[in-house]
Image (cartoon, rainbow, N blue to C red):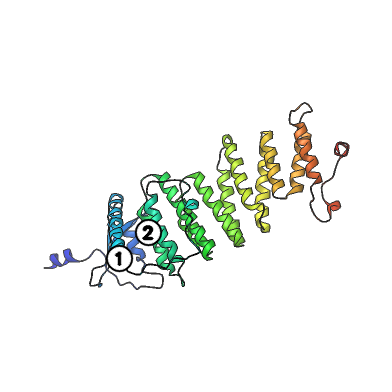
Amino acid sequence: MVGEQNENEPFFEEIVKKTKTGITFPKNLRELLFEEGIDVYFRMVVPKEKNKIILEVLSAEEVEQLSEKLMSKKKRTTKVSESKGVNKPKKSISLSPAWGEYFIYNFDSEEQVKTILESAFYKFAEKPINMEDAMGRVKYALVSFLSATKTENAKLYFAVEKFLIDIIEKFNQPNLLDWIFEKIIPHISSKFLYEQSLLELVDISLKFKRWEKAELYIFYILKNIDSYSKSEMYNVMNSFKQLVMKVRNVERSDKIDILLKEKLMEYGVGAEDIDYKIQIIEFLEDLKYIELAYDLAKKIQVSLPPESMKIEEVRKLVRRLHATPISENKPQSSIKLDDDDENEF
């Protein structure tokens, strides 16, 4: 009898309480069942009696099969509901999804994801917003259509991020910035799309004047730039170009300026190719860091041999920077012309 009782005892048993944020697996159970850093998916079933919640651990293959089955079932249910005149979410007359902005890079499950995001969009449009319902649909789109291909997943994550950024802007939901940064950005394995995703966050955070957020995102972009090898300077310059375009015409915090100045000067001094140095100077100029741009241009001018093909281009750059207004009281600027400069004007 004792042996039979032991065999029937559950592997784990404990009382848990639902909180405002949901139900959490006890820590000791998580340590027993789940490996850190590995995604785990469940099939959740609630019987008609609504007296229990059943979670069944699924393999990656089972997730894909079940997702297709549930989507097919959901479509059939939706068609039946529509034919019976069941109430649908009220759509905003003036606002609608900007599909062309979300799906920049095509991926296999694009149409299925689009269907789910469309329903989420109109949930965000409702007043008051049922945030749990709306975000539940977004999470479903992410979980249900992950594939074994990292590139496909990166495109999926990027599309969902673009969707949420549109939600932030259209429905004034800047608090979603943290969710995007924590739940989407770390899962984008493509170096290019990872950087593009951070640039999108920089853009929207500056629009909402969330300086501390923009500073964090810029820090990670600069960190990504540093990860390129010396042989990938073209990519470095392109990354700087994209970042400068995002921030040059908007209000910036002092910390953002410090981050940009230090990193641009680091590459401006360290670059071996004169063309890259000139590009860095032009980036500094675009950001109105005129004195830094001028100082760097002067150093390059002095270091060039007289027979260099770039000497005239650099001289024109120096002259232009000197003529560019720095402040209301320009005579007190730190820019000083030497005799050679005076003779060139």
Pointer 2 or 1: first along the chain: 1
> Badge 1: few (under 14), some or many (20 or more) residues near its Cα, within 10 Å?
few
Q: Residue 283: percent from the left, percent from the top?
A: 68, 45
> Badge 2: few (under 14), some or many (20 or more) residues near its Cα, within 10 Å?
some
Select label 2 or label 1 by which is in front: 1
Which of the labelled discs sits on residue 97, or is there none?
none
Residue 324, compared with residue 49, is above or below; it is: above
Q: Residue 319: percent from the left, percent from the top?
A: 80, 40
Q: Which residue is drawn at 57% across and 36% down?
A: 232
Q: Which residue is drawn at 53% across and 48% down?
A: 196
- Residue identified by numbered label 1: 81
Q: Which amino acid does label 2 sit on?
A: Tyr
Residue 289, compared with residue 173, is above or below; it is: above
> Secondary structure under badge 1?
helix
**Looking at the image, which is closer to me, 115 or 108?**
115
Q: What residue type is labelled 1?
A: Ser
Which of the labelled discs sits on residue 140, or is there none?
2
Q: Distance between the residues labelled 2 and 1?
A: 21 Å
> Secondary structure under badge 2?
helix
